[in-house]
Image (cartoon, coloured by chain):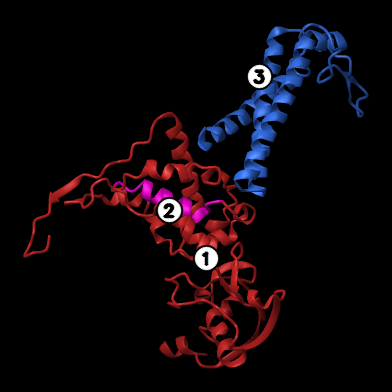
Chain colours: A red, B blue
Amino acid sequence: MQEIALKGFGEVLKTVTFRVRRYDPEKRELAKYMEYKVPVQMGMTVLDGILYIKEHLDHSVSARYSCRMGICGSCGMIINGKEQLACQTQILELNKDLIKVDPMGNYPIVKDLVPDLSKLFRNHGSVKPYIIREEEEPKSEFIQTPEQREEYAMFTDCILCGMCLSACPTNATDELYLGPQSLAQGYRYITDNRDMGFNERLNVLDSKHGVWRCHFSGACSEVCPKGVDPALGVQLLRQLLTSNSFVKYKQKEATKGPERKSVSGVS
Amino acid sequence: MRESRIMFLQYMTGLLILVFGSMHFLAISALAPTSDKILYLYNSSSGAHTLIGGTLNYYSVKAVYTSLAWGSVFELLLTFLVFHVFNGFRVILSEQFPGGTSEKIITYSMLIVALIIFIYGSNTIVVMLNGGGI
């Protein structure tokens, strides 16, 4: 059984052409595509292909990556026209002889396949993606039931790869638009019963370039590699903000557990 | 005003335009008395002329436009339309030209044009209510 599973490993099964978009803003040249022939073995991902190019064919090709297992979200790029994580995209599963690799859209390019994600992180920070409480240091734990966690659980899977912003058509035209990632994270923290920061986030989320600018194309949810549905988060946030116009939204305050006692010097 | 309130009005006026627009259409077609219709539908296979679905004659049109009730409906429809259309334009243009100064220019331009259209449209409705214009 194991022999069947491993059949083909280590063998070159086919040669695939990688058409990689090359652009270096420092050189002041127009972007161009360069082609590289990559021998493909079973289990090879697009990221493996790019690393093969760097190692054997052209070391000047630039790409960002880290964990190589779909956790860090560093290697997002447009592969054959669709935003995907290069480390999670199997070359053989693409079933193409030509693989076109572009950097993510709607971001400035640092070099080749490396986008500048400053905008993503700036927008993410603007919705205050953390639990906001009045007390400086809680003296006891906040009780949260599994059902209460379920309300926002999906949105905690976001790995900040930024592919939703790349696919978002509104983000392509409106550079001030918060984007699906930040809006979904805003919703995630508002619905967390430990959080009390609804009013602090309101000015950003309910602004001219906030939640109301979504055209609901759903591209963000389509490309999310972690199965998060940012478009759903945006719609739920709209619902929440609309009802807040009539009846002030009251965050569900978590009940507190027993006060912590100091144990051998650790408070 | 918060964007959520503006957009709530945008959605509500969209719905109301559908309702009042349908009333406007029905007033001069299906709701109108059959005997008032001057244009007939011609069935090419049977060769028959029917009164159903025709257009109102001049005096019936005038009767609709000089009625205070219908005038109010048209005025409301105009209000909803002007808000919906020009707020829609504001949103579209703000997305195309984001930024503090450009958005201010867009908002005030839309407000001025909307006011002009509203005044012109209201004047037309009032003129018609007084039996003029048609």
Q: On screen, A115 above or below A231? A: below
- Say whether marks 3 and 1 touch (CB < 8 Å): no
Q: Is residue A148 left or right of residue B9?
A: left
- Chain on which label 1 sits: A
Dominant SS type (magenta) = helix
Residue sitting nearer the eye, B96 or A88? B96
Q: Which residues are magenta?
A: A177-193
- Residue A190 in the magenta stretch? The answer is yes
Q: Earlier in the sequence, mark 1 or mark 2?
A: 1
Tell me the amino acid under the disc marked 2. Answer: Gln
- Give coordinates of residue A71: x percent, y percent: 42, 71
Residue at the (31%, 44%) spot, across then down: A196
Residue at the (63%, 39%) spot, across then down: B104
Tell me the amino acid under the disc marked 1. Answer: Leu
Residue at the (57%, 84%) spot, across then down: A49
Mark 1 crowdedness (10 Å alpha carbons): few <14, some 14-19, many ≥20: some
Residue linked to disc 1: A117
Q: CA distance from mark 3 to mark 2?
A: 40 Å
Q: Is residue A171 left or right of residue B113?
A: left
Residue linked to disc 2: A185
Q: Quadrant of residue B58?
A: top right
Q: CA distance from mark 3 to mark 1?
A: 48 Å
The answer to whether residue A115 is visible is yes
Both marks 1 and 2 on one chain: yes
Residue linked to disc 3: B76
Q: On screen, A12 above or below B104? A: below
- Residue A186 in the magenta stretch? The answer is yes
